[in-house]
Image: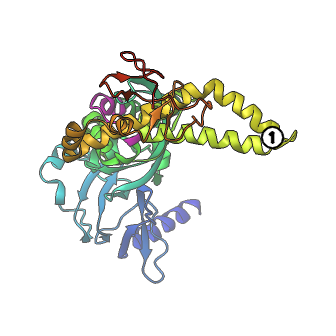
C-alpha cells in the first residue's frame, strides 16, 4: 500500500507540474536589491512542485529588473530586458544582455550551470535601479587640514549614499548571501560599510588637499561622490559588480578643540574690519554707561566711577577709535580713487580740520572740537599766533619783541 501511495503521489505531482504558470518578482521596494520570483497560479493549479518551473511557464520581467534562471545554484539563463519570456527546457540559453552588452556573457561563463539535467529551478530578480538612502556615519573624527584656518581640524560626517548594480551576475555571485530569497540593502551594507568609510576618509582628505574649506564640505556632495567613485568604484565594480552613484552629507560636526579654534579665528577675522572694531569700542562705552545708570549706590556714584575708569582707559579708547577711523578712511580712499586724489590735494581730513581750528587732538588721543576733552577733561591747548612783527609764537608773549598775545 505504501508503494502505491508513493506512485500515486508521484503521478499527481508530474501532472500538476505541466500546468502553465506565470512567475513575477516578489515585492521589490526602493531598498530591495534581490528577491525571488513568485508563482501566480492559474485557477485550481495549486499542486505544482515548489522549486520546479514547468516547461512553457511564463516569466514576467518588469523595467529596471534583471532576471536570472537558476538550477542547483547555478545560473542557466538570464535577461536584462523587460517583457514576457517562455521557459523551454529543450532550448539553449537566450542570454538577453540588454544594456549590459557582450561583457555580461563573460560573467555568465564563470557562473553558468555545468550542463547537467536541471533538478531544482528557481527564478530570481535583481534591482537595477539606483538604491538610495543608505545611511552612514563616521564613528571617529576625521582629520582635515584647512588652508583657510591653517590648522588641522577634526570632523564627523553623517549622511546617505546610493549604489547601482553594474554587473548583476557578478553581484549575485559575490554579494548575495546563499539560500536567501530576499535581500534588502541593509542586510549587506554592514559588511561593506568599513570599506565605504575608509574611502570616505580618503576622499575628504583629498578635498582638503584641493583647498576646499571645511565649512564647504557639506555642500560638496557631488564633488565628494566623484572623489568616492575614483577611490572605491574600481574595487567594488571589479569584485562585486556595483558602484557608488552619489554621496550626500546631511550634517558635519567638529570636536571641541576644532570648534574653539574656528570660533577664535572667525572672531579675529571679524575684528580685522575697522568698522566692526569701532562698533566694539562704542558698544563698550555704551555698556559702561548703562551699567553706571543701573548702579544701586546711585547713578552719580556710578558715573563718578565711570569717569575715573574712562580717565584711566581713555587714552587707549581714544587711540583705538582714532586708528579705526583712519583705517576706514584709508579703505574708502582705496575704493574711491577720486577721493584719494582730493585727499592728496588737501591733506588728511584731521590735518585740515586742525589747521582750520575746527578739531584738535587731546594728549589722551581723543579727537575733539570743543574747548575741553570729553574723555579726560583736559582743556583745549592754545594754537599758534602771529605777532605784529611777523614772528609766529605759541606762548603768551612774542619771543622777538615781547609783546603779549592779543
Nearer to the camera, 379 or 286: 379
**Prevalent SS, magenta region:** helix
Residue 98 x, y percent position in the rendering: 17, 60
Q: How busy is the neighbourhood of tag 1: few (under 14 within 10 Å), some, or many (20 plus)?
A: few
Residue with the mark numbered 1? 300
Quadrant (top left, top right, bottom left, bottom right) of the C terminus: top left
Identify which residue is drawn at 25% across, 48% down. Answer: 167
The range drawn in magenta is 203-217
As drawn, 216 above or below 33:
above
Identify which residue is drawn at 14% across, 47% down. Answer: 103
Query: In which quadrant of the rendered view does residue 200 lie?
Result: top left
As drawn, 61 above or below 169:
below
Nearer to the camera, 384 or 209: 384
Residue 61 x, y percent position in the rendering: 30, 68
User: Is 205 colored magenta in this rendering?
Assistant: yes
Residue 116 x, y percent position in the rendering: 27, 47
Residue found at the very far right of the displayed protein: 297
Residue 358 x, y percent position in the rendering: 42, 42
User: Is 50 colored magenta in this rendering?
Assistant: no
Amino acid at each position: 500500500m505504501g508503494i502505491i501511495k508513493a506512485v500515486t503521489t508521484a503521478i499527481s505531482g508530474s501532472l500538476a507540474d505541466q500546468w502553465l504558470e506565470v512567475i513575477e518578482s516578489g515585492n521589490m521596494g526602493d531598498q530591495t536589491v534581490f528577491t525571488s520570483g513568485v508563482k501566480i497560479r492559474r485557477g485550481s493549479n495549486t499542486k505544482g512542485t515548489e522549486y520546479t518551473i514547468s516547461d512553457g511557464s511564463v516569466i514576467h520581467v518588469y523595467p529596471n529588473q534583471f532576471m536570472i534562471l537558476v538550477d542547483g545554484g547555478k545560473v542557466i539563463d538570464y535577461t536584462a530586458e523587460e517583457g514576457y519570456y517562455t521557459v523551454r527546457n529543450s532550448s539553449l540559453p537566450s542570454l538577453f544582455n540588454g544594456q549590459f552588452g557582450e561583457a555580461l556573457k563573460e560573467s555568465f561563463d564563470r557562473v553558468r550551470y555545468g550542463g547537467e539535467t536541471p533538478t531544482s529551478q528557481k527564478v530570481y530578480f535583481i534591482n537595477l535601479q539606483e538604491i538610495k538612502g543608505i545611511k552612514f556615519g563616521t564613528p571617529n573624527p576625521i582629520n582635515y587640514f584647512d588652508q583657510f584656518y591653517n590648522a588641522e581640524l577634526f570632523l564627523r560626517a553623517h549622511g546617505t549614499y546610493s549604489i547601482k548594480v553594474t554587473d548583476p551576475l557578478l553581484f549575485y555571485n559575490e554579494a548575495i548571501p546563499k539560500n536567501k530569497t530576499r535581500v534588502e540593502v541593509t542586510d549587506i551594507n554592514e559588511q561593506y560599510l568599513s570599506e565605504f568609510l575608509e574611502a570616505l576618509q580618503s576622499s575628504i582628505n583629498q578635498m582638503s588637499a584641493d583647498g576646499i574649506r571645511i565649512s564647504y564640505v557639506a555642500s560638496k556632495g557631488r564633488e565628494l561622490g566623484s572623489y568616492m567613485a575614483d577611490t572605491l568604484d574600481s574595487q567594488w565594480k571589479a569584485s562585486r559588480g556595483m558602484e557608488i552613484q552619489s554621496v550626500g552629507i546631511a550634517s558635519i560636526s567638529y570636536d571641541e578643540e576644532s570648534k574653539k579654534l574656528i570660533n577664535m579665528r572667525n572672531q579675529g577675522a571679524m575684528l580685522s574690519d575697522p568698522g566692526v572694531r569701532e562698533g566694539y569700542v562704542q558698544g563698550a562705552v555704551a555698556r559702561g554707561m548703562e551699567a553706571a545708570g543701573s548702579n544701586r549706590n546711585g547713578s552719580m556714584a556710578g558715573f563718578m566711577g565711570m569717569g575715573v575708569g574712562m580717565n584711566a582707559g581713555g587714552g587707549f579708547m581714544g587711540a583705538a577709535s582714532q586708528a579705526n577711523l583712519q583705517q576706514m578712511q584709508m579703505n574708502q580712499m582705496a575704493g574711491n580713487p577720486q577721493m584719494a586724489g582730493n585727499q592728496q590735494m588737501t591733506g588728511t581730513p584731521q590735518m585740515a580740520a586742525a589747521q582750520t581750528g575746527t578739531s584738535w587732538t587731546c594728549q589722551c588721543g581723543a579727537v575733539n572740537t570743543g574747548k575741553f576733552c570729553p574723555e579726560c577733561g583736559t582743556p583745549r591747548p592754545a594754537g599758534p599766533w602771529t605777532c605784529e612783527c611777523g614772528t609766529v609764537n605759541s606762548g603768551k608773549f612774542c619771543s622777538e619783541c615781547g609783546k603779549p598775545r592779543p
